Image (cartoon, rainbow, N blue to C red):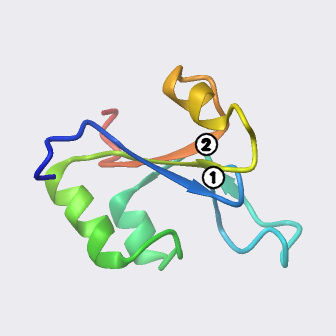
Amino acid sequence: AEMDCQALFKATQVDGVYSADPAKTPDAKRYDRLSYGDVLKQDLKIMDGAAIALARDSRIPIIVFSIKSQTGLALELQGEGSSTTIDSGEGT
């Protein structure tokens, strides 16, 4: 927030945010988009709740993508990757 970032890219072991750990729950649902409130209400273990709240208050979208792909970040920066976007839910 202090650096006036336009977005936060969070690399993980999976290609986005799921309703449960997909390694343990094969039928876990992958979300394309979530609101900050949904993440906090459902207690999705993406990152610390305070970090989610700070991103919400600063209106910084969070893009969660897989670090396993060598081209993952490049694709995300081009808007072509597989990821979950967390934002206000207002079409930011």
- Decide which of 46, 39 is in the foreground and name it: 46
**Residue 84 left/right relative to 81:** left
Relative to 1, residue 28 above or below: below
Residue shown at 15%/58% (left/top)? 57
Neighbourhood count class around disc 1 (C-alpha, 10 Å): few under 14, some 14–19, many 20 upward: many
- Decide which of 10, 89 is in the foreground and name it: 10
**Residue 53 left/right relative to 83:** left
Tell me where residue 39 appears, x and y as whole percent: 44, 67
Residue 71, by quadrant, is top right
Residue shown at 60%/47% (left/top)? 65
What distance separates the C-alpha of mark 2 from that of mark 1? 5 Å
In this view, which residue lies farthest toward the right? 26
Residue shown at 62%/23% (left/top)? 80
Residue 28, by quadrant, is bottom right
Which residue is tagged 2?
A: 83
Residue shown at 50%/27% (left/top)? 77
Relative to 48, residue 82 above or below: above
Tell me where residue 53 appears, x and y as whole percent: 25, 68
Tell me where residue 38 appears, x and y as whole percent: 42, 65
Looking at the image, do the residues carrying marks 2 and 1 touch, with CB atoms under 8 Å apart?
yes
